[in-house]
Amino acid sequence: MSALDAALRNPVPATLHGALGGFGAVRGGAARFAPEVSPFAGLPLDPGPADWADLAALCGPDRDVVLVRAGDGPPVLPDGWVLRWPFPAIQMDGAGVPGGPDPDAVELGSADRAEMAELAAATRPGPWMARTAELGRFVGFRHDGRLVAMAGERMRLGPAGEVATEISAVCTDPELRGKGLARRLVEAVVAGIVARGERPVLHVSAANENAVRLYRSMGFTVSRAMRFDMLRTPGAA
C-alpha cells in the first residue's frame, strides 16, 4: 500500500498532520477539525480504548462529531458513544480526469462568504461551517449577479510529491439544475488541482446514484467504500 493510499483510507488525520494542520487538533491517534471548520474527525482504522479517549477529549462531552474512515459498516463503539446517523459513502479517484478552466467561473473569496453559506444552506452539499471556505480554492457561477453554483476544495493530504486534494461543496441552485453547471465547476476545480501536480479525489453518498453517474462520466473511478458516521461523544462523568 502506498503512503498516499494509506492517507486516503484515513483522510482526517492525514490532512491535519499536513499542510492544513492549523485547521484542527490532534491528540495521540485521534484528530479532529475545529468545529467552525468541519465536523469531521478521524481515528486509527483499528482504534483502541486510548484512541477513543483521545477523541472524546478533543471533542468534549455530549458533542456531535462525524467519524470519517474507509469501511463498509458503522464503527464498533465503546460504552458511552452513540451512533446518531450512519452514512455510507464512496471515495472516487480523479487521477484520469484532466479538467479544464471555465471562462465563466469566478474565483470566490472572503467577500463572497455570506452568499456561499446561503447557497450551501439551500442545497446541502455536505457540512458547511463558518470557516469551511478557508480550506482551499472555490469557484462559482453567477446569474443576474447572484451566486447560483459553486465547488471547491476541502481535505488535502499525502506525502510530498504525491498529494491528493478533495473536491467538495459541489452545489447548484435548484432552479438551475440540469444545465451542466456542477460538471463545469468540477472540471474547473480539477484543473486547478492538476496544475499544482496533485490528484483530485471526492466523496459522494453511496445512495446518490445521479452524482456517482455524473462523476463516472467525467472519468472518476470508485476507489473504496467510506463512512461518514455522525457520533455523539460520551457525557460528562
Image (cartoon, rainbow, N blue to C red):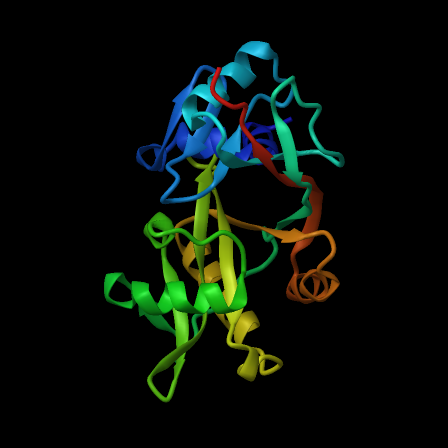
* Residue ranking furthest to the bottom: 144
Q: Position of residue 202 (x, y in %)?
A: 57, 51
Q: What residue is rendered at 47% in x and 20% in y?
A: 236
Res. 226 visible in picture: yes
Nearest to the observer: residue 185 or residue 82: 82
Q: Is residue 201 left or right of residue 23?
A: right
Instruction: Indicate whether 8 appears above or below 44.
Output: below
Instruction: Indicate whether 214 appears above or below 230.
Output: below
Instruction: Indicate whether 174 appears above or below 203.
Output: below
Q: Position of residue 160 (x, y in %)?
A: 41, 33
Nearest to the observer: residue 229 or residue 95: 229
Q: Position of residue 77 (x, y in %)?
A: 67, 23
Q: What residue is rendered at 58% in x and 59% in y?
A: 97
| Quadrant assignment, res 189 | bottom left
* Residue ranking furthest to the front: 237
Numbered marks: total: 0
Res. 159 visible in picture: no
Q: What residue is rendered at 38% in x and 44% in y?
A: 37
Quarter of the image for the N terminus: give it.
top right
Q: What residue is rendered at 31% in x and 63% in y?
A: 113
Q: Position of residue 183 (x, y in %)?
A: 57, 71
Nearest to the observer: residue 40 or residue 97: 40
| Quadrant assignment, res 119 | bottom left
